[in-house]
Structures are given as structure tokens and as C-alpha cells.
Image (tube, rainbow, N blue to C red):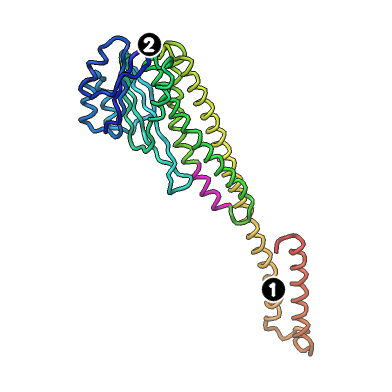
Amino acid sequence: MLINCVAYDNGSKLADIPVADISEFIARPGCFVWVALADASPAELEEMREEFGLHELAVEDAQHGHQRPKIEEYGTSLFVVMHLLEPEPDQPGAFSVGEVDVFVGPNYILSVRNRSRQGFLGVRARCEREPELLRHGSGFVLYALMDAVVDRYFPIIDALEVELERIEQQIFNKGAARESIKQLYDLKQRTLVLKRAVAPLLEGAGKLHGGRVPQICVGSQEYFRDVMDHLLRINGLIDGMRETIGTAIQVNFSMVTIEDNEVTKRLAAWASIFAVCTAFVGVWGMNFDQMPELKWRYGYPAALLLIASVCGYLYYRFRRAGWV
């Protein structure tokens, strides 16, 4: 679906133009065209390939979707893939993974958004409010899109940190260890999804501000450095969170072991008490004629009293030791 197709000249908006006129405007000196698509069909991508002269391999990646975040060069053009992470409104703490594919050339930029509800109309409005920066052309628009995508990662990681803190607070609650482990593994999985969105993009963004920078991005190097700084910060937060999750899981395993040991100690204590009872009863249950207490009038109550006394003493000692 076509969202908008706009031509710009020297940083100022000329007009919304039909797709059929794209080739005419990109042929003008100092003019570039910015097109936004959402969930584009193969026919729409093929039409854009013909208008902009896009590389067929980049178009094929955009058609298949589910690409790894990356930045690839095709001659004088770039193909950028970024993951879009959006919170699920009906599932607290969960988020969906979308994708935006960006084709960038000297006189055009095409963004193709897939499986995402959030658009980039705010990015276009921001760029149009800053014509002196928009004069840098498609390179600055690429920065603005990347900056918007990366900034959307911060609320996600903030929500994950809040959830991690909540789980940490209940670690030492009695009986909560097993449930905490389940929550921590779920949190670890979502953190891994965020890591897979950030780490490859971090690697690719490094090519846009240092070393042999693509010609399209030469005028916007300092802006891409800002995106790089944000990605480095997010990546560091993710690594710190993953380390904390790993530590929390180990602590929970230790708590489970401690709780199991407590149960084992209680069972061992009661088993010892009943073993004493069994031993006494077993002795007096033997059928021998010459047992002194067999003919004693008070032998039965004395035996019960002895058993109760020994069991009571064992219970007292186990109680003091914290076993029962």
C-alpha cells in the first residue's frame, strides 16, 4: 500500500506526485523523491524497481521479508533492513517484531514497512521542519528513519528492566523460585529478540560514519555517529540485563535447592523419630520367653513412656536444629 510519494528540491517540499512521475523528478538536478510503502505487494515493489532502478537482489530480500538487520551497498545505492519492535497492547511485556526495508540512492529514498502498526509520518514531518538539514538529501532521511527506529527500542528495554526488577524482588519469597525461573527464561528470550535487532544493526551503522563512508552519507556522518552512540548504549544495557538474568536464574536454582534441602531435612527428622519407635517396638515384639519385662505389671505403660520420651527428646533436638 502506498502511504505517500513526495518530491523535494533543495530541502523544500515540491509536491505529492504520482508514482508514474517518479522517474521524471529524480532526473532533475538537486531533486529527490521520498516514497513510503506499507506491506507492499510484489507488483508494487516491481513498479518501484522500474522507477528507481533498484537492484534485483535487494528487491528480492524485501519481497521475502524476515531479513537479518543489515546495511548493504549496491553500487551508489544502499539497502538497509531494520527490525521494528512494538509492544502488544493486549499482552503486557510482550512485543511483536516487524521490519522496515529502506532503499537509498543519490536522488531517492524508498521505505517499505512490513508487519508494523506504527508508521513514520512523524519522521517526514520532522525532516520537513528542518529544510537546512533536508538539503543533505536522502542521506539525512536515512539517518532520520534509523534514529526513529532506534529510539523506539528504548521504551522496550525500559519495560524489560522494570519487569526484571519486579522478578528480582520476589526471588527470596518462599515458594516463588520455580515461578521466577519461568519468568526469567521468558524475559531472557525477549531480551534475545532485542539483541538480534540491535547487534547486527550496530555492526552495519559503523560503516556510515567512519572509514570509507558511502557517498550518500558523506554529508550526514555526524548524525550517523549519534545513531551509533544510541545503539552502543542499548547494546550495553542488553548485555548487562542478560548478565543479571543469568545471575538471577542461578540464585533461583540455589533457592530451589535450599527449599528441597529443607524438605529433605524434615523428612529425615521424622524418619529418625519413627525409626526409634520401630526399633523399640521391634525389640519388644520378639517372641522370647525370657524377657524380664514380659511378666511385669507395668511393662506395657513403661515401654510406651520410654518410646514417647525418646521420641520427644529427638523432636526437641531436631526442633532446635531447625529441621522440623
Residue 162 at x, y percent in the picture: 56, 42
Q: How crowded is the residue under tag 2: few (<14 C-alpha within 10 Å), some, or many (20+)? A: few
Q: Is residue 182 magenta?
A: yes
- Highlighted range, magenta: 177-187
Image-quadrant location for residue 241? top right
Query: Which three-letter amino acid code belongs to the residue tagged 1?
Result: Ala
Given residues 154 and 276, the one toward you in this image is 154
Image-quadrant location for residue 246? top right
Left/right of residue 154 with respect to residue 131 in the rendered view: right
Residue 279 is tagged as 1
Residue 312 at x, y percent in the picture: 76, 72
Q: Give the number of the mark in front: 1 or 2.
A: 2
Residue 204, can we see it? Answer: no
State whether the magenta stretch is mostly helix, strand or loop.
Answer: helix
**Callout 1: SS:** helix
Given residues 42 and 255, the one toward you in this image is 42
| Tag 2 residue | 215
Residue 161 is tagged as none
Q: How crowded is the residue under tag 1: few (<14 C-alpha within 10 Å), some, or many (20+)? A: few
Left/right of residue 211 with respect to residue 318 in the rendered view: left
- Which sits earlier in the primary sequence, circle 1 or circle 2? 2
Query: Which three-letter amino acid code belongs to the residue tagged 2?
Result: Gln
Q: Residue at x 46, y 33 (%)?
A: 152
Residue 225 at x, y percent in the picture: 49, 18
